Image: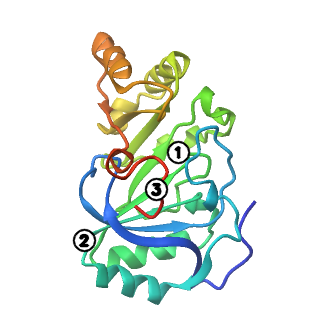
Amino acid sequence: MRPEPQQSDRFQVVEAFLSLQGESTHAGKLCYFIRLAGCNLRCSYCDTAYAQSAAAGAPRRLAELLDQVRQSGAPLVEITGGEPLEHPNLPLLCQALLTAGLEVLLETNGSRSIAAVPAAVRKIVDCKLPSSGMSAANCFDNFRHLQPHDEVKFVIGDRTDYQYARRVIDEYHLTDSTSHLLFSPVWGSVEPAELAGWIIEDKLPVRLQIQLHKLIWGPDKTGV
């Protein structure tokens, strides 16, 4: 469900906080997170169900968010969710953060078009795999809009997911679009060593990532 129509300078924010980036090619870096409310998918392994409702959190003005990011001292900011692209005014937030001189990451579930997102934003685009229960929702047209700095993430729950991810990479020639292809094991479903073995055996040009924040603070901690 989409959030209710908002004034263009307001965003429904579930939480905003300073932490370390737990995923992507920026893992381990100081990062300010803005988690927006509302998600159109219901993935089997979702670890942010508290952000699924469009009414979660509270409305925040753009100027307030910019002030908080500046005060945090972090040069890196990630917009996440929920699904940020459920907010029609998302490009405004992205551009304001870029104009403020920040490096901006956008994490999206891959079901909504990224075409309107400013090119300078580093998009981290999920490709939903069968075990998520949401693979039919993939917007494969997004791959046409990838910039070389963008990333595609595959969250892998089993061997079927792994093979599906391989087929998508080949079919859409993703190694020609970006060198940032991320394979992440579903926490508690696939051992990292097992996924690592598959990648090594097939010599895939991908990056294995583990959710660093869950290793540091545990799988159930929020606001980190």
Image coordinates of residue 10 in percent, x first then y, are 58, 83
Residue type at numbered disc 1: Asn
Residue at the spot x=33%, y=12% of the render? 202
Crowding around mark 2 (Cα neighbors within 10 Å: few <14, some 14 to 19, many 20+) is: some
Going by the image, does 198 lie left or right of 101?
right
Left of 109 or right of it: where is 194? left
Q: Which residue is drawn at 58% across and 52% down?
A: 113
Residue with the most extreme top position: 201
Badge 3: residue crowd in 10 Å (few <14, some 14–19, many ≥20) = few
Q: Quadrant of residue 110?
A: top right
Residue 136, given in percent of the width and then of the height, sits at 68, 34
Q: Distance between the residues labelled 1 and 3?
A: 31 Å
User: Which is more foreground, mark 2 or mark 1?
Assistant: 2
Whether residue 186 is situated above or below residue 69 in the rendered picture: above
Residue of label 2: 75
**Residue 12 left/right relative to 207:** right
Q: Where is residue 212 in the image (x, y as percent from the top left)?
A: 32, 46
- Where is mark 3, residue-wise? 221
Q: Which mark is residue 142?
A: 1
Q: Which of marks 2 and 1 is nearer the N terminus?
A: 2
Q: Which amino acid does label 3 sit on?
A: Lys
Instruction: Name the amino acid, label 2.
Output: Pro
Quadrant for residue 120, please give it: bottom left
Q: How crowded is mark 1: few (under 14 residues within 10 Å), some or many (20 or more)?
A: some
Secondary structure under the numbered disc 1 in the rendered image: helix
Which mark, residue 2? none
Q: In which quarter of the image is the C terminus?
A: bottom left
Rendered position, 180 above or below 121 = above
150 or 74: nearer the viewer = 74
Which is nearer the N-term, disc 1 or disc 3?
1
Q: Secondary structure under badge 3?
A: loop
Q: Is residue 55 above or below residue 198?
A: below
